Image: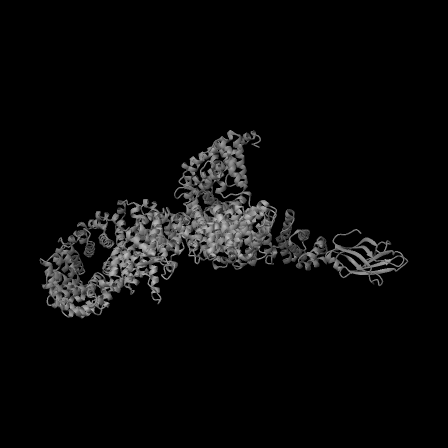
Amino acid sequence: MMMEDASVCTKVLDAEATKLLLKLLGPGNEASVRAEAAAALKSLSAQCKEARKEIANANGIPVLINATIAPSKEFMQGEFAQALQENAMCALANISGGLSFVIASLGQSLESCGSPAQVADTLGALASALMIYDIKAENMRASDPMEVEKTLVQQFKLKVPFLVQERTIEALASLYGNAVLASKLANSDAKRLLVGLITMAVNEVQEELIRSLLVLCNNEGSLWQALQGREGIQLLISLLGLSSEQQQECAVSLLCLLSHENDESKWAITAAGGIPPLVQILETGSAKAKEDSATILGNLCNHSEDIRACVESADAVPALLWLLKNGSSNGKEIAAKTLNHLIHKSDTATISQLTALLTSDLPESKIYVLDALKSLLSVAALNDMVHEGSAANDAIETMINILSSTKEETQAKSARALAGIFEIRKDLRETNIAVKTLWSLMKLLNVESESILVEASHCLAAIFLSIKENHDVAEVARDALPLLVVLANSSKLQVAEEAVCALANLLLDGEASAKAVSEEIICPATRVLREGTNIGKIHASAAIARLLGSRQIDSTLTDCLNCTGTVLALVSFLEGADSRSVATSEALDALAFLSRPVPDIGQMQPAWVVLADNPSSIAPIVSCIADATPLLQDKAIEILSRLCKAQALVLGNTIACATGCISSIARRVISSSNTRVQIGGAALLVCGAKVNHQRVVEELYESNLRASLVHSLVGMLSSTESSQAGDQGNDDIISISRITDETSKRDSEKSTSVICGSNIAIWLLSTLASHDDKTKLEIMEAGAIEVLTEKISQSFSQYAQTDYKEDGSIWICALLLAVLFQDREIIRANATMKSIPVLANLLRTEDASNRYFAAQAVASLVCNGSRGTLLSAANSGAPTGLISLLGCADDDINDLLELSEEFALVRYPDQVALERFFRVDDIRAGATSRKAIPALVDLLKPIPDRPGAPFLSLGLLIQLANDCPSNQTVMVESGALEGLTKYLSLSPQDAFEKAATDLLGILFSTAEIRRHESAFGAVSQLVAVLRLGGRAARYSAAKALENLFSADHVRNAESSRQAVQPLVEILNTGMEKEQHAAIAALVRLLSENPSRALAVADVEMNAVDVLCRILSSNYSMELKGDAAELCCVLFGNTRIRSTVAAARCVEPLVSLLVTEYGPAHQSVVRALDKLLDDEQLAELVAAHGAVIPLVGLLYGRNYLLHEAISRALVKLGKDRPACKMEMVKAGVVESVLDILHEAPDFLSAAFAELLRILTNNATIAKGASAAKVVEPFFMLLTRLEFGPDGQHSALQVLVNILEHPQCRADYTLPSQQCMEPLLPLLDSPASAVQQLAAELLSHLLLEDHLQTDPLTQQVIGPLVRILGSGIPILQHRAVRALVSVAATWPNEIAKEGGVSELSKVILQSDPLLPNALWESAASVLSSILQFSSEFYLEVPVAVLVRLLHSGSESTVVGALNALLVLESDDSTSAEAMAESGAIEALLDILRGHQCEETAARLLEVLLNNVKIRDSKVTKSAIVPLSQYLLDPQTQGQQARLLATLALGDLFQNEALARTADAVSACRALVNLLEDQPTEEMKVVAICALQNLVMYSRSNKRAVAEAGGVQVVLDLIGSGDPETSVQAAMFIKLLFSNGTIQEYASSETVRAITAAIEKDLWASGTVNEEYLKALNSLFGNFPRLRATEPSTLSIPHLVTSLKTGSEATQEAALDALFLLRQAWSACPAEVSRAQSIAAADAIPLLQYLIQSGPPRFQEKAEFLLQCLPGTLVVTIKKGSNMRQSVGNASVYCKLTLGNTPPRQTKVVSTGPNPDWEESFSWSFESPPKGQKLHISCKNKSKMGKSSFGKVTIQIDRVVMLGAVAGEYTLLPESKSGPSRNLEIEFQWSNKEVSC
């Protein structure tokens, strides 16, 4: 109305309807109402300016904004949701001046939004505006989409709320989906697709896609870069398999854009496995997805053949064919393009389809079909091709048949396609199909069409390719020879060329070649060579080559070749031919045949001699090497290589002078697979190198072929063919002599003088490598080392063969390795490592040259290699082989020494290598040395032919023994220990004695050797040396004993005691050096065995006194330090500590602390530390003022000293407060902190323990010194390797300080400094560390600024894990900490598993938590539940139930909500709730009238569970629920309803309904019904009462006494159908027996009858419950059947019987049956009235008998037999009433019982009279057992007087209602057909006028 008439707007404004319309937009209204209200506002604002102002003034803009976002915010769907959004936005645009203003305003308002919810709402409104923005809005005022995009992108902030992000994505989708706005944005399609995927993605995938979108929006890269290249491709492909069609389309479209934009994406799609899902989308995707998928596949196929093969293997062809057939026009075009590059795979169905097209009348498609068939048949299975009836066979047969077509073009195209197939299919060429094709083609050789002749000849050439294999083809083809010869001589060159091609392939057949006349082939072929095309020349050359190859070149053929000039023609062809052409290969083939020796030609000149006569003719052959194709180069090299041995220099000059020849030869050596070509090429390079080595090297450098050449040469080494080619017994061998000097040819028989076969490559490599370091590297990179290694390895297996002949390859291989290993880079290669074991094996062979050069290779390795190389060589066993070469004479290896000098190798590789080996510590300490030591030990024995070996062996053993315990052990096992001991027993010279003792000292430095059984014997010998040996030997013996005493069994042996006295004597009388050694030996002997220290006291002079003298005298500080160390050992014994001498040592020891000799300090402190274990000595030490000196030593980096000082200070500080204060005053804290920052962990732990002792004193902890500790100790805790003990001490220090509030107030440590160090400690495996960390954290979190710090989030996870530790003290600390942060970080606590762990704590019963702590844990959990409902399901049921007992209402509410959600998601959880005591808790909550509705709701849900109702706990709920309903304080209607429902649920259990408490529930429910509740509550209460009265008579009585009967009678007349029906059901149950019969009255019947009548009027049917209630009254109270209301109910019962359902019919039938049973006892007028009323049911009863359920039949029959009715008999007609003369006058007479007879009219119309007369009889009740007699009589005077009669039983008619049929009159006629009467019977309640 407003849009049609603007004046209506004024009326609307006057009526103040604007506010009402805005109110209707609210969420409380129906969607349709809201949409129409928005439409009205839209019209109003569009038509009236005043309306726009009024809407704005009425705060309408926010309302309209909320309306625009309502569909997404409230999850609305459908047309009303869309209309609401669009209408509201249009109204907003009208008010604001247009959509552009709205968009700009919303974008600007985003910055001022104060909460995420406001931001989300604004974004939603912006999305709506962008969605409906159109060209009209654009023309009015254009919006800037780039600015909008920028604004939206800014909303993607870190940790943005989910709702804001969702609305932002919504807005972006609207922006990019709007065609008007998106056209102005770059990459809008890609952005739109990305947004589409984002809306459908989840979690990490969504985040990745958002990052990609931001890159595009910020113009930071292309789509490929935005998606992060291959990672993005992988992501998109993973989305292709999702079920969403829209998501598939977006992902495929993005891939399509990428495949167009970036070539790298094509490889990425393939590598990521994208082809199979793309093919799947071709089959099952949407139309758009199929087209994009086909486009992508086409792009992939066009990009790479490898990718095309992948697409083909993915079965893309069928899908593309389907798209080609059924797709859109665009899809067909795309499919056609893709198939053009893809279709190479056979498919039966496809072949059949294409074959059908081939035979159709569509000429324009035949070329394409033929090409497609060619592609398919080229890969079809051979069985399918040859099997008759298969699709492939039909296709190729069709193509063959087309050869006989009348269309010339079709014939030619078919021949071409067949040629293509036969060229590819070798197997097909060998079948009978080729024969069939051949016959058809031969028929075409006589036609005149040039195109047919060309294509037919081409096809024949293809078929002839397998002429050798297909004898049938050969047999037929031989007949084609004359025809082809004729065509070859054709004047048409193209025909001649194709014929020569066919002839060339035909000559592959031996018989055809033998049958051919040479002149007939040579002449046309030579013509083609001169005049033909390149392809023709190729085949001409092939024809000549095959002809020459098939026969011996004799004089006749030679004469023909000379006459025709074929050789020069071939050479001329080589000059002018394309150097890359195959023709050159064929020409060279022919020349190769011609270059062979020709026997028996007499004086005739061989054809190839022309090359010698014409030197210039060699140039084309050489040019083939430089410029031609590889095949040509191979042929040329093969020819020229035959001249290498005889004409090496001449050939070398020619090659060196030819530009590019050397590089070309190198390329062929590199690329050729022909071994002879490779060896020949290498030989040619060697020839060139002999002439001009520099030229060869330079050209190899310039052409960058050096590395590749080396690769090829290395490949030749491993070639079997190369080895065979190098067999010196081969007549055609290629070889080069190493000796070029004429004077040296007498030495040519030596094995090193001639290099043959593959050895040529080795020698060439060796020569190149010896002059160029870069070549060495390239040889290595080419894999030469592996090949040489393998070659040497193979020689080992051949060496054992009896027919093995040394060819020099082994020593040459070793020589090359030795040269290569001079380069450090090569030695570092992995291949070098693999060669080492082979060289080691070669060292063990018998051949001297092989062993020598193997040693050279090893020496090169160890001299130039890294430490790792030496280790690998040593591990291979090479040292053992080298040892076997030690001491060899020079005369035996003189020739090898010369070769070493030639290649700059060392002369004695064995000595050099071993010396270098044993320099390496790992080798010296490894298995290699252990293997070498026995051999070296054996060399200690004199060897006649190796006199220098013992000396070298001894030096190597000493080298090996130093600092290598494993080698020492091996030496001992090899007998070195016994030998040395035996040697000492012989009293050798001093120098050897010293050396022996030195070696023993080295050996005894190893624990394993000290445990050796021979060690005991060595002790005695060393003690003897102490007593009797020289001064140098005594010192060495003492050092050896020092090492030996490290062994427990030696130290504890009785023989070791013998060393004490001589050692003490040396200590007392020896030189200072000897004293040092003696002290060291005594320390080693007495350490770790305090009881053995007593042995010192047993000697003549007490060692402690000696030590005290040394400490107090002017000895060197070094000796005093050693003496202090011995004191430390001795003071470990309690008895020695208690001596006076020990007490005398205190003062000199303390005095040593203040000396400047640092090394003694540690021993002194350790000695004092031992003394401090004695309390009296500790007091003495403190009295001598040791504290200050000890503190004074805490400087520098002597960390072991600092640790000892810390231990001593800890012992001094325990229980000595004065000492603690003295330490603090002495600056111990400051000293510790100065060292702490760089102290190692063990020292830091000691410092922490020291400070722990100090800060245990509260005064110190609160002091200024302790304040300095906090920050460094937090830093200390960040050390990764800081151990648990240190962590514990450090944490205790911090706790001692920070547990004081005033101390915390003084520190303002940032969270990073004080929180981060505690994070890992909370997860420490040490529970004590965890406890202290949690305790410290709980103190820190009492500070407000730390509670809200973001870093606090990180401590939540560890605290939660501590909760799960099960350790009570840890749990207490963790809960205390979590309480402080629960209000700030509830979500983080939950995400870290806090829900589970808090639940465990709340349920903890052993030990039972204090209530305050329990409430704290519950409070934390409640905070989590209040934060988000997503955590409801994570909390165990028992925990939630426990929370119901909390004193906090918020905790209870959270628990109730969680329990409700949990039950709705998993109904089985209800049982767990009940078992956990939820019912009792809920009842308590209801009694307290708190959270009533929620508690009642949960209680109802629980009691509705069957298993819970069966439990014992539910019984106790009856009385509380009843009291709750009766409680006046219970005001909440919803809570009362839910409580009523709960009671109803309870009483579904029969046992509960029978309890005594149920009576109270009855009264409560009746009272509830009396209070006029809502209809819903009425139904619920009635249902509950139904359950109560169903099982208990007492409940019925209680309901009745409470006035329930009258209440329910009032309710049965309720206007609410459901309430009325439930009331009827309740009456049925209430009066189901006679318990309350006094309350059963006719008024009850009347009320039910009224309800029935009302139901009939309202719906036309009756609810069966009314009838069942009536039946209950009639059945249990017969007196009610004769009442007036009962009679009045009968018509309604009949109507119900007619219109009701089956159940209703049954109930109505039962009611009528019950009433009928009372008729006999009723007054006559009552029974008659009821029977007449019930007679209306006769038709219905008859119908039920016939068609109703079987159970209805008995009662229906019974009723029918009691109801009054009318019998109607209709005589319709008769038949066959004939008589012999005239027509009979027939009538019928009817007699029924005692009634007067009836008679029809007389009919005389013929033998078939037609009466159609009816007769009726009325009965009070149906006539039982009566029969109807009908006589058919004749009134005519002629003929019979009677035609017969029929008797009919009436009972059947009563039951069926209507019966009709023909009845035969009896007696039957004997002469004619039977006489029949057609009669119809009917029984009904209606009287019929007859």
Looking at the rendered image, the quarter that the N terminus falls into is: top right
In the image, 504 versus 1468, the foreground residue is 504
Q: Nearer the viewer, residue 236 or 1313?
A: 236
Q: Is residue 822 visible?
A: yes
Residue 568: x and y in percent read 44, 49
> Residue 1691 location, x and y as percent?
69, 51
Please give the name of the residue rendered at 72% of the width and 57% of the height, measured from the top-left corner: 1760
Q: Position of residue 138 (x, y in %)?
A: 49, 33
Residue closest to the eye, 1597 or 386: 386
Left or right, residue 127 beside residue 1210: right
Q: Is residue 1620 left or right of residue 152?
A: right
Colour scheme of this structure image?
one colour
Give above or below for 1864 relative to 563. Answer: below
Q: Relative to the observer, which residue lies in front, 450 or 1043? A: 450
* Residue 637 position within the rendered picture, expressed as x and y whole percent measured from the top left: 39, 52
Quarter of the rendering containing residue 920: bottom left
